[in-house]
């Protein structure tokens, strides 16, 4: 692999930023590090790093697998067909896209849109974990099996894990099918809508200052 290797950031030691530090500038600095990263071979084969987009203080964060061709061209996650479907799901849930933060497990497009391999996931994981710490969302939605295995349980099955809350630290994690899976199998749409209805309940309860039921 050519080019200098860039060390990933160390995850933050707590859920809150230091006094007086805004998450936006901190995310900008993290993005600069990610753009210079050469810790795996994915950067050599993609156009650009697709870091993430949205509200840097979002209460709801969505994590997918990796950028596709449209995302690689535009530098924004979830802008292709799967992203358009995700937009419709969020709209039906009455959640504005600019209120949430959207990213992927890996920030560079894998060749031929294949799933990232474990070495690529491990190379990029410190960036994702630091994004979560900086943004400090109350709810994290794992879109698809890879995000679920990466953030909830490495042995998780998306079909068994979806639809249930997973409390990890101070955050509530929900696994559901990736929008791309819905394009291949429209029958999964009803399960995703069921999952998002649970998300809406917790999101609205949290917005009103209520506690989340375990």
Image (cartoon, rainbow, N blue to C red):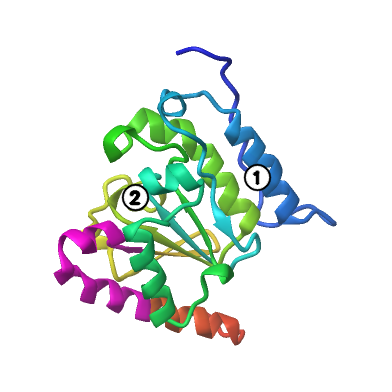
Classify mark 2: helix, strand or loop. loop
Residue 187 counted in the magenta span: yes
Left or right of 200 on screen, residue 113: left
- On the image, which quarter does residue 79 sit in? bottom left
Quadrant position of the N terminus in the picture: top left
**120 or 114, nearer to the observer:** 114
- Looking at the image, can residue 213 be seen? no
Residue 109 counted in the magenta span: no
The crowd level at tag 1 (other Cα within 10 Å; few <14, some 14-19, many 20+) is some
Above or below — where is 41 with respect to 94? above
Left or right of 23 on screen, residue 124: left
Q: Residue at x 35, y 35 (%)?
A: 110
In the rendering, at what x and y percent does residue 151 appear? 41, 50
Principal SS element in the magenta part? helix
Disc number at residue 153? Answer: 2
Q: Residue at x 32, y 59 (%)?
A: 81
In the rendering, at what x and y percent does residue 191 appear? 23, 73
Q: CA distance from mark 1 to mark 2?
A: 21 Å
In the rendering, at what x and y percent does residue 199 appear? 41, 76
The crowd level at tag 2 (other Cα within 10 Å; few <14, some 14-19, many 20+) is few
**3 or 84, nearer to the observer:** 84
**18 or 124, nearer to the observer:** 124
Q: Which residues are magenta?
A: 175-197
Q: Quickly name the residue at label 1.
A: 12
Q: Residue at x 37, y 79 (%)?
A: 198
């Amino acid at each position: 692999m050519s080019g200098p290797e860039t060390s990933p950031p160390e995850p933050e030691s707590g859920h809150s930023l230091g006094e007086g530090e805004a998450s936006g500038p901190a995310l900008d600095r993290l993005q600069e590090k990610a753009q210079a990263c050469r810790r795996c071979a994915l950067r050599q084969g993609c156009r650009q790093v697709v870091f993430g987009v949205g509200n840097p203080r979002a209460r709801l964060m969505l994590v997918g697998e990796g950028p596709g061709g449209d995302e690689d061209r535009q530098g924004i996650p979830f802008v292709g067909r799967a992203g358009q479907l995700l937009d419709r799901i969020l709209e039906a849930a009455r959640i504005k896209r600019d209120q949430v933060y959207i990213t992927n497990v890996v920030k560079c497009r894998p060749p031929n849109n294949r799933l990232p391999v474990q070495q690529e996931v491990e190379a990029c994981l410190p960036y994702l974990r630091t994004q979560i710490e900086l943004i400090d969302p109350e709810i994290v939605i794992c879109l698809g099996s890879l995000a679920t295995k990466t953030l909830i349980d490495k042995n998780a099955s998306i079909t068994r894990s979806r639809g249930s809350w997973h409390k990890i630290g101070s955050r509530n994690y929900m696994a559901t099918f990736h929008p791309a899976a819905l394009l291949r199998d429209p029958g999964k749409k009803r399960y995703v809508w069921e999952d998002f209805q649970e998300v809406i309940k917790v999101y609205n309860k949290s917005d009103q200052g209520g506690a989340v039921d375990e």
